[in-house]
Image (spheres, rainbow, N blue to C red):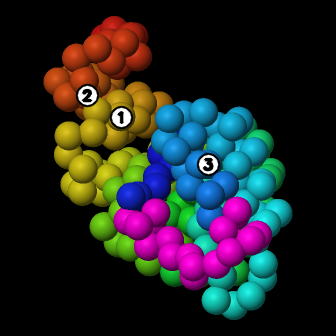
Amino acid sequence: LKPSITLAQLESFTFQQQTGREASALVSFLAGVIEYRNNNYKSALERFDAALSNISLEPRLFESLVYIYFYRANTNIYLKDCKFAVQDFDQFIQLNSRQAEAYNNRGGAYFCLGEYQIALQDFRKAIQIDPQYADAYYNSGVAYTSLNNYKLAIQEYNKAIELDPQDAINYKSRGDAYNSLGEYKLSIQDYGQSIIYEPQYAEAYSSRGIAY
């Protein structure tokens, strides 16, 4: 799956200039973001926990609170603590229900928990909010594949490819769906296309060899 997070989300994070606990929360949050972007997820989680323990629930700080939950949820996905990730995304969505990435990434957490149908609902909600969201179409395809609905999966991969035509994994995943339907010629074509965009894609070579 493709969890996503954008720099714009960080840049939109605004704190009132405060002293004391609020300032400490800001420092912890920004330190957590640095650790997150360096893939130091355990350390990032500790920072986000500290930020939430120091932030107040005053309305003027709600925007700050929202993005701490958002980053901590994504951190928990990478740490495979998907139940906690869902809980944090729930908190985020309660405060900001129009963020497509939150639904997409919560869907990823539900997928991690094996709740494929619920995950699919979140991916579709993300698409409803942002119809140009390629990752959400891809993730919908993965969910349909896990539900053994390969024809619908292919439709989702088609849209992901339309929006992001140079992403090798889109072709690889569509090739897998074609392969599951016995459409080996089409699967071989897709595996070949994924290799064009990612020449070191070992799984694509392996799948293409099996399809032949």
Q: Indicate which disc, 1 or 3, sits on the residue closer to the N terminus.
A: 3
Circle 1 Cα neighbour tier, 10 Å, few/some/many (<14 / 14–19 / ≥20): many
Q: Indicate which disc, 2 or 1, sits on the residue closer to the N terminus.
A: 1
Circle 3 Cα neighbour tier, 10 Å, few/some/many (<14 / 14–19 / ≥20): many
State the residue in front, 27 or 192.
27
Q: CA distance from mark 2 to mark 1?
A: 7 Å
Which residue lies under the disc numbered 3?
A: 32
Which mark lies nearer to you, 1 or 3?
A: 3
Asked if marks 3 and 2 touch (Cβ < 8 Å), the reply is no
Asked if marks 2 and 1 touch (Cβ < 8 Å), the reply is yes
- Residue 67, compared with residue 105, is above or below; it is below
- Tell me which residue sits at (24%, 56%) in the image: 163
State the residue in front, 94 or 165.
94
Q: Which mark is residue 169?
A: 1
Which mark lies nearer to you, 3 or 2?
A: 3
Magenta range is 8-25
Is 6 left, or right, of 166 in this rendering? Answer: right
* Three-letter amino acid code at the position of disc 1: Ile
Instruction: Examine the structure image and report whether residue 87 is included in the region drawn in magenta.
Output: no
The percent position of residue 113, horizontal first and vertical second, equals 76, 45
* Three-letter amino acid code at the position of disc 2: Ser
Looking at the rendered image, the quarter that the C terminus falls into is: top left
Mark yes or no: residue 44 visible.
yes
Residue lying furthest bottom in this view?
59
